[in-house]
Image: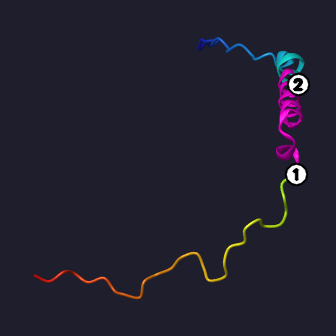
Amino acid sequence: MEETYNLPTPPKINMAIFREYIAPLLVVLTFLIALVAVSARIFLPNDMAAPAPIEEVSPIPKTGLLQFDKAIATTPTR
């Protein structure tokens, strides 16, 4: 007859602790951070508390951003 060995089982993580304490704490902390971020507009100066403008203040010229010289670089001669 062969002997069987019972290996010790690792302790199971109690999910009730996560559901009852950790998850609600994370939800409340997320809500409080969002509330602080939204409420911070009260303490800003009036011109910064306004929504961002939609139109461009200084439009980019149509000629392009980069100006290249038409000269081709060559190696210097001695």
Q: Quadrant of residue 25?
A: top right
Label 2, label 1: how far apart the Cα atoms are: 27 Å
Q: Quadrant of residue 65?
A: bottom right
Quadrant into which the N terminus falls: top right
Q: Nearer the viewer, residue 59 or 23?
A: 59
Q: Residue at x 82, y 45 (%)?
A: 48
Q: Residue at x 10, y 81 (%)?
A: 78
Q: Percent from the top left, x then y, of residue 52? A: 83, 54
Q: Check the image and tell me how it is coloured.
A: rainbow
Start and end of the magenta stretch? Answer: 25-50
Tell whether position 36 is magenta: yes
Q: Percent from the top left, x then y, of residue 10? A: 67, 15
Q: Nearer the viewer, residue 61 or 38?
A: 61
Tag 2 and tag 1, C-beta contact below 8 Å: no
Secondary structure of the residue carrying numbered label 2: helix
Secondary structure of the residue carrying numbered label 1: loop
**Left or right for 58, reference 40:** left
Under mark 1, the amino acid is Pro
Mark 1 crowdedness (10 Å alpha carbons): few <14, some 14-19, many ≥20: few
Query: Which is nearer the N-term, disc 2 or disc 1?
Result: 2
Q: Percent from the top left, x then y, of residue 3? A: 60, 11
Q: Nearer the viewer, residue 29 or 26?
A: 29
Residue linked to disc 1: 51
Tell whether position 45 is magenta: yes
Extreme residue in the front direction: 46
The rendered magenta stretch, by its main secondary structure, is classed as helix
Residue linked to disc 2: 28
